[in-house]
Image (cartoon, coloured by chain):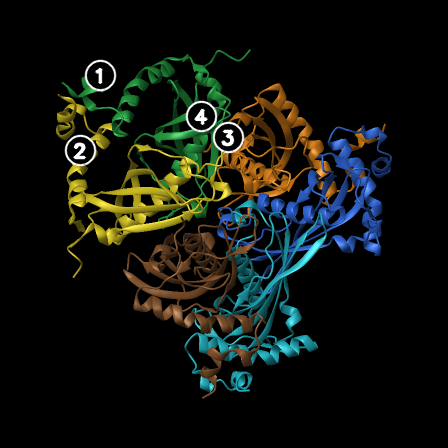
Chain colours: A blue, B orange, C green, D yellow, E cyan, F brown
Amino acid sequence: MPVEFKHPSATKTIMTEMVLPNDTNALNNLRGGKILHWMDIATAISAQKLANRPVVTVSVDHVSFLNPIKLGDVVTIESKVTRTFNSSMETFVQVWAENLPTQTKYKCNDAYYSFVALDSNGRPTKTTELVPETDDEKDQFEKAMKRRQLRLILAGRMKPEEADELKSLFAQ
Amino acid sequence: MPVEFKHPSATKTIMTEMVLPNDTNALNNLRGGKILHWMDIATAISAQKLANRPVVTVSVDHVSFLNPIKLGDVVTIESKVTRTFNSSMETFVQVWAENLPTQTKYKCNDAYYSFVALDSNGRPTKTTELVPETDDEKDQFEKAMKRRQLRLILAGRMKPEEADELKSLFAQ
Amino acid sequence: MPVEFKHPSATKTIMTEMVLPNDTNALNNLRGGKILHWMDIATAISAQKLANRPVVTVSVDHVSFLNPIKLGDVVTIESKVTRTFNSSMETFVQVWAENLPTQTKYKCNDAYYSFVALDSNGRPTKTTELVPETDDEKDQFEKAMKRRQLRLILAGRMKPEEADELKSLFAQ
Amino acid sequence: MPVEFKHPSATKTIMTEMVLPNDTNALNNLRGGKILHWMDIATAISAQKLANRPVVTVSVDHVSFLNPIKLGDVVTIESKVTRTFNSSMETFVQVWAENLPTQTKYKCNDAYYSFVALDSNGRPTKTTELVPETDDEKDQFEKAMKRRQLRLILAGRMKPEEADELKSLFAQ
Amino acid sequence: MPVEFKHPSATKTIMTEMVLPNDTNALNNLRGGKILHWMDIATAISAQKLANRPVVTVSVDHVSFLNPIKLGDVVTIESKVTRTFNSSMETFVQVWAENLPTQTKYKCNDAYYSFVALDSNGRPTKTTELVPETDDEKDQFEKAMKRRQLRLILAGRMKPEEADELKSLFAQ
Amino acid sequence: MPVEFKHPSATKTIMTEMVLPNDTNALNNLRGGKILHWMDIATAISAQKLANRPVVTVSVDHVSFLNPIKLGDVVTIESKVTRTFNSSMETFVQVWAENLPTQTKYKCNDAYYSFVALDSNGRPTKTTELVPETDDEKDQFEKAMKRRQLRLILAGRMKPEEADELKSLFAQ
């Protein structure tokens, strides 16, 4: 009998990477595109840990790059699934970097990547349900509805006036 | 005397890539993270074509992946700068893929990447002004204000109720 | 019904690449081998655009490297099919590089790569015919015979004295 | 006191590579561009062994790809310097591939790459003289003049009618 | 004032990687050499976390590969520093792999990598002292002397008959 | 009829590599992990040359890194099979590096990698027998028994007191 639900902790993924020359731009900073790539792999692993199936990225929400990451720094990427929907799931990923010789650790960015799990015919399928445990996980779980509406609007699949969760934010 | 302004066409960048095995996931589809990486390089080149300076990625807006791209397909990426702000610029990038043996060409996704140009001390600096020419470029230019407000809200740097451009969208 | 012929413009491919540390030698110049690699991919895509079939490289003509390309420069590669023969086609590829901060653009090299298209059994097959349009394309088309003779001689598949097109060049 | 001359054997370089998935095209054959890249590295090492200085590729002569190389095959690349000129040197490189499970070894292609050695200011400089020893090396050394004339003609730096070494070939 | 000592937990590093096509051999198993490479990066990060200085690998102890790791599997690598010596430190690293669709997790191998920390002149230097906390860490700490003697013998820097810690093992 | 035995010379493999930026650490030295990776490929090719079958790495013996290898240096890797056992074979690999501009060549390290050859069902199988020829090969062949016992002890598959070949070493 398959598992009925999982907690976000069961989907946690930690990646550690070192910034190598080819990952940087002319200023010796890690390229934004490389970070987006690593975050995609970490969140895809989290999504697979929940679904135990192949997954495909369906969207990435807005990402801000707070601090440039330097050549030689060590990058830590942590991701978890935050909520499942009908045929998709949302993951949250955070990125820190650390300069070990100077012992400076700094937050770089975070993002929400969404995935769809596929069945053996390559068609979207339901995944195992996710049940949040900690306060932080419950908060992420709840606000996921708001992010989903924004996502649907931005993808042109929902009209702004139908986005009940979001409307309240602006209609003040 | 430096150039006073440029048209978006002067910033146009076209990349063509072939999807190789290491770029794909277990389903033989191009990873979302790899597309995000290529889009970052193309838009960074567009931004540099305007600024003639090193640039750093400051944000990526929401990206939806419409169609999976298969191993062996040819990917075409086109980007242009759409608008400059005080110390940043917005670029627009579109991605198509084509299966040459079957002659099927399909749109995969598009996105807005924002960049800051840096002076010789590595500090943000003004770039050459951008003047839109075509109707499409003028439209992108105008709507850039709305996207910028959404970006500031999502990065936690603007309150939703201050976003005049966006409020009208929801307050119906 | 399949297309009867195509113009060279239908086979045009543009690649844009940035020179990264691993692509360079000890002098911070792009390695010749890396340029040859990129030109092979661009021309293979052009050849596939004509043939709509898998293609294999059969030869590269003489390549001279005019100017070294520096780390961080942006490389633009443009290729087109120039002529089809019985079971092969010739492509022409040009490479420019640009240092964006100093706004210096320079020609690096050009070359002719030849390809054979393969049928579903992996055997050489005829491709769609190519009909040149512009004066430049017509000139490339005509001179292709001369290059082909030189190619056959250099590959040891034609005797110099049989190369009518070439003989006139030397017998003056 | 620096060495006055070297024999070609002192410049011999052997590379062994395995064909990995990313090196192949849709037919599981090694891409021509990848072979050209490996040949460039092997010949550059040979040229450095003679010059004991940094070198840059100045040209590649015509290359024919005789046999496709398959995924998983082992590729052996052997190169030597064949002759030095005023400020350049010519190298010869041969490529074989072997399928170890079936014990089939086959010749793939050979080519001439030319290099210039650079002094500490990055300017072309004379290299150590090369003195051929074996019959094969002496033959390569002599015919190098003919290849050099063809190279100069193809690069547009010599008129065909001035190419004494080549003229005899065609004027029969 | 610098830190006087650290616990092994402060040096813990977790890497997660996905096995991609280029990492595998003809049997679709992850190459042993790639695992050794990943283990080297993880342990180097652990060593840097203790030393807060650049480090160089000085040796790897015997590594047995228990189970082949398949293409697409997720590899988890965990490392910690186990003991510091005069001018070197020993790290322990463990590797597991997991096939997420079938939910099979298996141990692949473990190993000891030793590092030396370098001062600003690139010379070996003392690192922060390591104080074990848990029973497992204390056990690793103690047995490190035995492994060190074996290492010195294998590197030809100690005679077997001087290896007191090891002699007892065999002289039964 | 298959070959009954081979000499070590038939398994000899030479690789030549250039140290590129991405292969180095913050000190511009080649990473230990990258050397281990290259040694694994060279020895796997040697093992395949003996077995003419796919092979998998089963263990690596102790490796000491004698001298750091610098960015831009040329690395030469030479490997041979030293002995076959029931279902495995041992290979020996040596690594030198050379700085060509200064003409300094230095030994970097050597190691023993063991492999198992697999039949068409992916199961371990006997390989062609190896018969040593030179004095050096005979010496390697004989001492292989001692190394094998140490390997079995370190992998926990033999008790130290059963290791007759090794006991004599310590019991003095």
Left or right, residue D76 beside residue C5: left
Q: Which residue is mark 1?
A: C164
Element under disc 1: helix
Element under disc 3: loop
Give the residue type that dot 3 points to: Glu
Distance between the Cα atoms at labels 3 and 1?
57 Å
Give the residue type that dot 1 points to: Asp
Distance between the Cα atoms at labels 1 and 4?
30 Å
Q: Which residue is mark 4?
A: C123
Q: Nearer the viewer, mark 3 or mark 2?
A: 2
- In percent of width and height, residue A123 lies at 73, 34
Left or right, residue A167 beside residue C22: right
Q: Chain of mark 2?
A: D
Is the residue at mark 2 from the same chain as the one at mark 1? no
Distance between the Cα atoms at labels 2 and 4?
36 Å
Please give the name of the residue rendered at 32% of the width and 59% of the height, measured from the top-left corner. F99
